[in-house]
Amino acid sequence: MSTPDDALERLLEGNKRFVSGSSVHPNRCEETRRNLESAQRPYAVILSCSDSRVPVEIIFDVGFGEVFVVRTAGHTLSQDVMGSIEYAVQELGVQLVMILGHNNCGAVKSAVKTYSDEDSRGAGNVQAILDHIYPAVKKTCSCCDAGSKDFIDKAVKENVRYQVSELIKKDRYIAALLKFNQIKVVGAYYDIAASTIELLD
Ligand SMILES: [Zn+2]
């Protein structure tokens, strides 16, 4: 893959095939898997929500060796997650970083529900995820009712933008490559029913 834009175009083309029911299921044969045994050269790293309705390789119609996938509920960034993204860029030469959210995200719904009610917050590890989403909930325009479908969708998109900005702010290696246009970092939104990908500003 010669440029980050080529990588993005390849993913978007794959999603178009998936949406239109013409997936080609590339790079899944035995020969491909054998050739990949000694090394991998993926062209994109995707931080996606762990949601079972967002199977990354299927919705982009890609196969083995194409995308380096990191998944957490609510596609939140921890140091380990940033380390995984950085590894893909630094060691594997990945040029495109995508952070992928989706409609009806349970993690974002929980964050919206517990954001303004501290008594409803838990003490377990799930709370650590929600803590990473609260800044996005806070930034979500309050022109619609918290908990309404519109609000959740806006909060999901805000959460994608927030995680993108956090990655650039906290990962100096990624920020430096971005500055010299050597990589591209994009936020994207997946619609479960329509199966479409929308790139976010
Ligand atoms: Zn989700």
Image: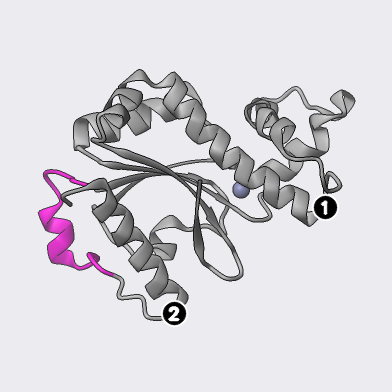
Q: Principal SS element in the magenta part?
A: loop
Q: Which residue is mark 1?
A: 148
Q: Amino acid at mark 2?
A: Ser
Q: Is residue 59 magenta?
A: no
Q: Is residue 31 magenta?
A: yes
Q: Secondary structure at mark 1?
A: loop
Q: Secondary structure at mark 2?
A: loop
Q: Amino acid at mark 1?
A: Ser
For mark 2, does the 10 Å Cα neighbourhood hold few (<14), some (14 to 19), or many (20 or more) residues?
few
List the single residue furthest toward the bottom. 21
Examine the rendering and report whether any part of residue 106 can be seen: no
The image's mark for residue 20 is: 2
For mark 1, does the 10 Å Cα neighbourhood hold few (<14), some (14 to 19), or many (20 or more) residues?
few
Q: Which residue does the image show at 41% across and 64% down from the upper left?
A: 58
Q: Is residue 129 left or right of residue 24?
A: right
Q: Is residue 152 left or right of residue 165?
A: right
Q: Is residue 184 left or right of residue 140?
A: left
| Rendered image quadrant of residue 150 | bottom right
Q: Which residue does the image show at 81% across and 27% down from the upper left?
A: 121
| Rendered image quadrant of residue 73 | top right
Q: Earlier in the sequence, mark 1 or mark 2?
A: 2
Q: Is the CB of the residue bearing disc 2 within 8 angstroms of ligand 1?
A: no
Q: x, y percentage for residue 84? A: 36, 31
- Give the magenta range: 26-42
For the rendered model, the colour scheme is one colour
